[in-house]
Amino acid sequence: MLVKAIKTRSLIPPQDNLLSVIKESVLEIKEKSVIVITSKVVSIWRGDCLKISQIEDKDSLIKKEADLYIDRTNDLPESVMLTIKNNILIPTSGIDESNANGYYILWPKNPAKDAKEIYQYIKKEFKLKNFGVIISDSHTTPLRTGIMGIGIAYYGFYPLRDYRNKKDIFGRKLKMSQTNIVDSLCAAAVYEMGEGAEQTPIAIIEDAGNIKFEIKTHKKDPLLIGIDEDIYAPFLKSVKWKTLRRDSWQEGGK
């Protein structure tokens, strides 16, 4: 597998043209590649940016953006507010201030739609047939120091590699194993793109192998599971989650 980070000009908040940056910065994309793009530049493209000086209370903004949240307490490291947004456990609803030039960069409001539109643009511009697009962000892992990449949306390929009912090297039938292709690729891509002043918000992954490229609408995203199905349900359900949204997928953690 080959991962190449792509240097671009700076995308300037509150809004800038991501598609033109792709066109001017990416020289070639091979068939069966996966293009990973950071959520920050997608949000800037969509104008999902708010001037910090005009926001009186960041906590209120975090709660508004979250599907579920836990109130900030002094017991948490650096007093971070924990949230769930788009079925992802993420601090501060994914709101970012780094490389933002005085703005809060929100998560894209409809990342699945954005991934599809970017896919369609790349398909036309580079005349590709089989490839994928992922919108990525940085993510923390409980009980681990540091951050790694996670996918918040994808398009153009099936997100899982299924090993269930196959046998391991000793002939034991596997019952649960499925590889999360989206986040696995994001971890490698975000590592190459960096977290500081690298100015490389795009990565192209070639020769990943064993990816089923397809354009298919699933009734339910096969990558996502609910709290009740999750192996960490005892922890997730023990929290007194709060929500400002009536349409929250797990209102109040009940």
Image (tube, rainbow, N blue to C red):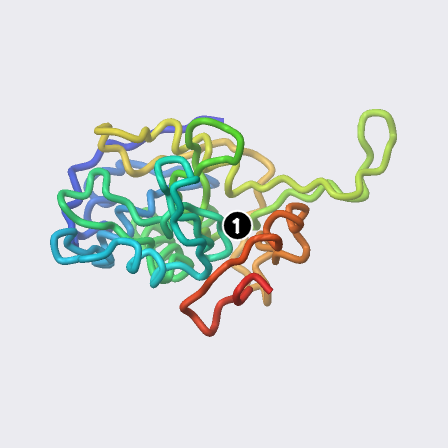
Report the front residue among 92 and 201: 92
Count all numbered tags in the image, as a single digit. 1
Report the front residue among 25 and 203: 203
Tell me if 105 is positioned left or right of 137 in this view. left
Q: Residue furthest front?
A: 74
Q: Residue at x 51, y 55 (%)?
A: 87
Q: Is residue 187 above or below residue 55?
A: above
Residue 133 visible, this angle: no
Q: Give the quadrant of the C terminus.
A: bottom right
Tell me if 7 is positioned left or right of 73 in this view. left
Tell me if 151 is positioned left or right of 213 in this view. left
Residue type indicated by callout 1: Phe
Q: Residue furthest right?
A: 171
Q: Residue at x 45, y 50 (%)?
A: 129
Q: Is residue 40 above or below residue 222?
A: above
Where in the figure is residue 41, as x and y percent of width and height?
Answer: 26, 47
Where in the figure is residue 207, as x and y percent of width and height?
Answer: 50, 31
Residue 176 visible, this angle: yes
Where in the figure is residue 226, as x and y percent of width and height?
Answer: 61, 58
The answer to which image quadrant residue 219 occupies is bottom right
Helix, strand, or loop for circle 1? loop
Q: Residue at x 81, y 25 (%)?
A: 169
Report the front residue among 226 and 181: 226
Instruction: Rate crowding at label 1 as few (under 14), some (14 to 19) or many (20 or more) other CA atoms within 10 Å.
Output: many
Where in the figure is residue 42, as x and y percent of width and height?
Answer: 29, 51
Q: Residue at x 41, y 33 (%)?
A: 189
> Residue beneath label 1, please?
157
